[in-house]
Amino acid sequence: MSSSDAANDAKERPGPQSKYDYKNGPPPLEINMKWCKACNICIALCPKDVFEPNRDGKPVIARAENCTQCTICWVHCPDLAITSNYK
């Protein structure tokens, strides 16, 4: 395995591992973009890589199926801009 193969393996996104089924209901989380100041703490702390920054630097839900409702993002959001639709 070359070093570039190892780098590509490290960049792979985690697969869906949530016990929740988001296909028939609302998205797992709501982000109040008016309250969000784009600190990106949620992006940095998310263990399942659910978020990506938009062009303004604010988080958007890129991989909803990965969300496990672990609470890390909304508990650590300094603006209280993230809420769960399931808890």
Image: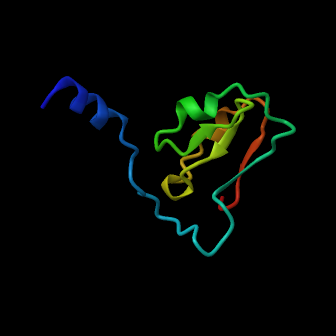
Task: Report the residue that reaches farthest toward the right.
Answer: 34
On screen, residue 5 above or below 12: above
Give the image's coloring scheme. Answer: rainbow
Q: How many marks?
A: 0
Q: Is residue 4 left or right of residue 13?
A: left
Q: Which quarter shows the N terminus? A: top left
State the residue at coordinates (75%, 31%).
56
| Front-lying residue, 74 or 27 | 27
Q: Where is residue 68 shown, x and y percent of the image?
A: 51, 54
Residue 79 position in % (x across, y down): 79, 32
Above or below, comparing residue 71 to residue 7 in the picture = below
- Which of these two is toward me, 46 or 62? 62
Pick whichever, 59 or 7, lies toward us. Answer: 7
Residue 6: name its quadrant: top left
Q: Residue furthest bottom?
A: 24
Q: Residue at x 62, y 34 (%)?
A: 42
Q: Residue at x 68, y 37 (%)?
A: 54
Q: In the image, 24: left or right of 81?
A: left
State the image coordinates of residue 72 (x, y, percent, origin top left): 58, 39
State the residue in front, 3 or 41: 3
* Direction from residue 84 to residue 68 in the image, left or right: left
Q: Quadrant of the C terminus?
A: bottom right
Q: Is residue 13 above or below residue 84?
A: above
Residue for point 46% across, 64% down: 19
Residue 26 vs 5, above or below: the answer is below
